[in-house]
Image (cartoon, rainbow, N blue to C red):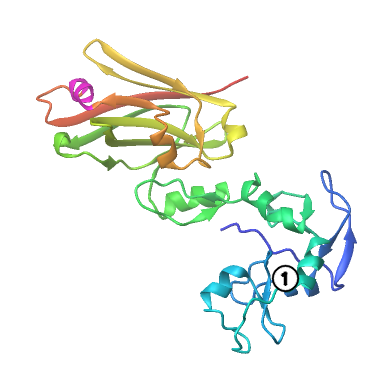
Amino acid sequence: MAIAKSEAGSNSMLSKTTLGLGGKHGLYSTNGVHELLECPVCTNLMYPPIHQCPNGHTLCSDCKIRVHNCCPTCRYELGDIRCLALEKVAESLELPCRYQSLGCHDIFPYYSKLKHEQHCRFRLYNCPYAGSECSVTGDIPTLVGHLKEDHKVDMHDGCTFNHRYVKANPNEVENATWMLTVFNCFGRQFCLHFEAFQLGMAPVYMAFLRFMGDDIEAKKFSYSLEVGANGRKLIWQGIPRSIRDSHGKVRDSQDGLIIQRNLALYFSGGDRQELKLRITGRIWKEE
């Protein structure tokens, strides 16, 4: 799995560096200062207020609560002593983004770094599988392999598809999620979701496409979904949502093909006791 490497530098405590395109000059933490700013409990970088015990051992504000105000190093009571000197040192530092190894080459003031990383376009993606809560994160190649090997999802090559969804006793099912399908198209990956849920008081089915990449790239593509039978047809056309947006967020925004249960059963034919819905679709690249 691809993970970002920690910000390490040379053996000196502070060094001046010039990074590539998009970078800038700045003092950034290497081994010595980096270790001082690392919380000994959670090992994350510390941000104000940085606490210290009477013996000078430091830790972050979150961990101060976690250790019940007792220094984890010497067991002295922590009290409310701030390590103002270390906070001031941190103020003068600039650090590389933690996702530098994945392509982000900028450096940031210490206290701006965390905010940047929360929105960095090179940050890791959450697993897009919707059938269960999955905590795996990674870059796109890692997640594609994870979906295939661990979730056993269907993988297809091509930009057109014809997918059939079947469910017995559909009137008894208010919430259901079908197996994710992944399409490899234009050298990128797209996830097709299909599920049943309650929209207000109305039982519905919904199909939508998510793009395995960021939102800017997703907007370079469009897709259509179509379902119908007996001379009637529903068509949806839209832009795939990035997997940065969670499955639930896309569903709740109703950004996809929504089919009322009665109409879905009409499209299924027969005695309306079994869902047999065929959805066709196409993905294309906007010029």
Residue 46 is situated, as x and y percent measured from the top left of the image, at 67, 67
The answer to whether 142 is drawn above or below residue 202 in the figure is: below
Q: Residue at x 50, y 33 (%)?
A: 241
Which of 80/203 is in front? 80
The answer to whether 99 is drawn above or below residue 130 in the figure is: below
Q: Helix or strand or loop: what does disc 1 sit on?
A: loop
Q: Residue at x 72, y 70 (%)?
A: 37
Which of 247/224 is in front? 247
Q: Residue at x 39, y 53 (%)?
A: 133
Instruction: Name the amino acid, label 1.
Output: Leu
Residue 264 included in the magenta stretch of the image: yes
Which residue is under mark 1?
Answer: 37
Bounds of the magenta span? 261-267
Prevailing secondary structure class for the magenta stretch in the rendered image: helix
Residue 123 is situated, as x and y percent measured from the top left of the image, at 62, 50
Tell me which corner region of the image, top left, top right, bottom left or bottom right, holds residue 1. Answer: bottom right
Q: Residue at x 19, y 24 (%)?
A: 262
Structural crowding at the residue carrying mark 1, measured as other residues with C-alpha within 10 Å and reported as few (<14), some (14–19) or many (≥20)? many
Whether residue 155 is visible, yes or no, is: no
The answer to whether 147 is drawn above or below residue 218 in the figure is: below
